[in-house]
Amino acid sequence: MSNCPLVWIIMGVSGSGKTVVGRLLSEWLESDFLEGDRRHSRSNIIKMQSQMPLDDGDRHQWLLELEADIQRAVTKNRETVLTCSALKASYRQQLTALERVQLVWLNVPRPDLQCRLLRRANHYMKPDMLNSQLATFEPIGPEENVITIDGRLLPAKIVDELLNQATWLYPDLEKSWWQRLTT
C-alpha cells in the first residue's frame, strides 16, 4: 500500500486550519484538493448560518458524498487531499473504510480556535458554533490511523511536520505520487 497514491483527510474543528494546511499539502504533493465544506447541502449551510449545530442526520448525505469523493480518488489512483471535520469516530471509520486513506488531526486548543474564528470573515461557521463542534468531537482512539499535528504551528511548519511523520509510515512518499504508481 505504501507505494500507492493516498487520500489525505485533514481534519479538525472549525478554525483549526484544515483548508490552509490542506491546500499547502496538496501543492507540495502536486495532488488534487477537495474542500469538504463544499459538499454540505444548502440546508446544512443555512442551519449553520443560523447558529444551529448539525446532527447525524444532517451529516449523513454529506459523509456519503465525501465517501464517494474518496472512492473516485482511489479508483482513479489519484493522490488527493480532502478536508473534513470528522468529529465522530463513526465518521472517521466510514471515511477510512477504503484502504489508502490517511487521517491527519490538527490539534488546536479552544482559546486559539476562538481567536481564529473571531478573525475569520465571510464564513458561515461563526465563533458561537465552536462549542457544539467541541462537544460533538470524540477523542481519537489508539486504534485509529491518525497523524496528530500541533495546529498552532505556522501552516508551512505543519506540512513539514506532517511529511516528516508520514515518511516513517510511507517511505515511498519521497517520490511524487505518479512515480509511486509504477513501483
Image (cartoon, helix red, strand yellow):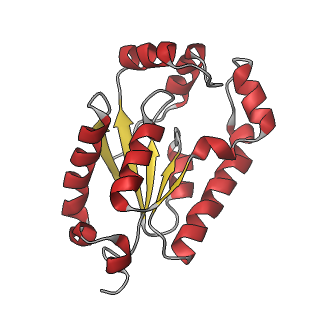
Q: The N terminus appears in which quarter of the rendering?
A: bottom left
Q: Position of residue 35 (x, y in %)?
A: 56, 46
Q: Is residue 165 left or right of residue 117?
A: left
Q: Nearer the viewer, residue 50 or 60?
A: 50
Q: Position of residue 103 (x, y in %)?
A: 41, 52
Please identify the residue farthest to the bottom as the structure is shown: 182
Q: Is residue 21 above or below residue 113?
A: below
Task: Please give the name of the residue rendered at 47% of the width and 35% of the height, measured from the top-left corner.
Answer: 138
How many numbered discs, if any?
0
Q: Is residue 5 above or below residue 69?
A: below
Q: Position of residue 152 (x, y in %)?
A: 29, 27
Task: Please give the name of the residue rendered at 41% of the width and 66% of the height, measured from the top-left corner.
Answer: 6
Q: Is residue 162 above or below residue 108?
A: below
Q: Toward which corner of the image does residue 53 lie, by quadrant?
A: top right
Q: Is residue 74 left or right of residue 20?
A: right
Q: Position of residue 167 (x, y in %)?
A: 21, 61
Q: The C terminus appears in which quarter of the rendering?
A: bottom left
Q: Is residue 143 visible?
A: no
